[in-house]
Image (cartoon, grey):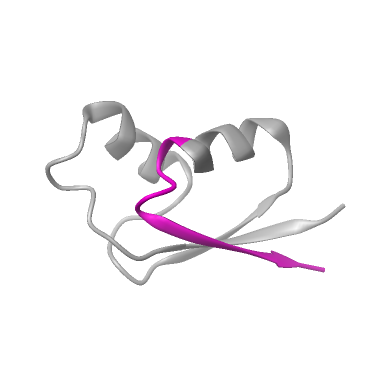
């Protein structure tokens, strides 16, 4: 299955609580952190919630 490389590029400070919680769930704590996740609908939904704070790349 395809994996996604998620990188935090902006801070969650000033965002809504659910956005901060979503960043933590994705394994991102500070700017520049990266996390590799399975390409699943649940993960895609979390990425959509914080799309303005992260970048996503597909990793084979």
Decide: is 31 above or below 19. below
| Residue 31 coordinates in the image, percent (x, y) | 29, 66
Residue drawn at (35%, 53%) of the image: 53
| Residue 47 coordinates in the image, percent (x, y) | 52, 43
3 left or right of 37 in image: right
34 left or right of 2 in image: left
Q: For the magenta stretch, what is the residue range?
A: 49-60
Please give the count of numbered marks on the rendered protein: 0
44 left or right of 27 in image: right
| Residue 54 coordinates in the image, percent (x, y) | 42, 57
Decide: is 3 above or below 38. below
Q: Is residue 59 magenta?
A: yes
Question: Can you tell which quarter of the image residue 42 is in?
Answer: top right
Question: Can you tell which quarter of the image residue 29 is in?
Answer: bottom left
Residue drawn at (31%, 27%) of the image: 18
- Determine the residue located farthest toward the left in the rendered image: 14
Question: Can you tell which quarter of the image residue 21 is in?
Answer: top left
28 left or right of 46 in image: left
Q: Is residue 6 magenta?
A: no
Decide: is 41 above or below 52. above
Location of the C terminus (image quadrant): bottom right
| Residue 51 coordinates in the image, percent (x, y) | 44, 47
- Determine the residue located farthest toward the front in the rendered image: 52
Residue drawn at (22%, 56%) of the image: 11
């Amino acid at each position: 299955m395809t994996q996604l490389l998620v990188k935090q590029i902006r801070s969650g400070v000033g965002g809504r609580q659910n956005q901060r919680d979503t960043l933590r769930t994705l394994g991102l704590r500070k700017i520049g952190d990266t996390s590799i996740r399975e390409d699943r609908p649940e993960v895609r939904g979390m990425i959509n919630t914080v799309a303005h704070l992260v970048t996503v790349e597909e990793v084979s």
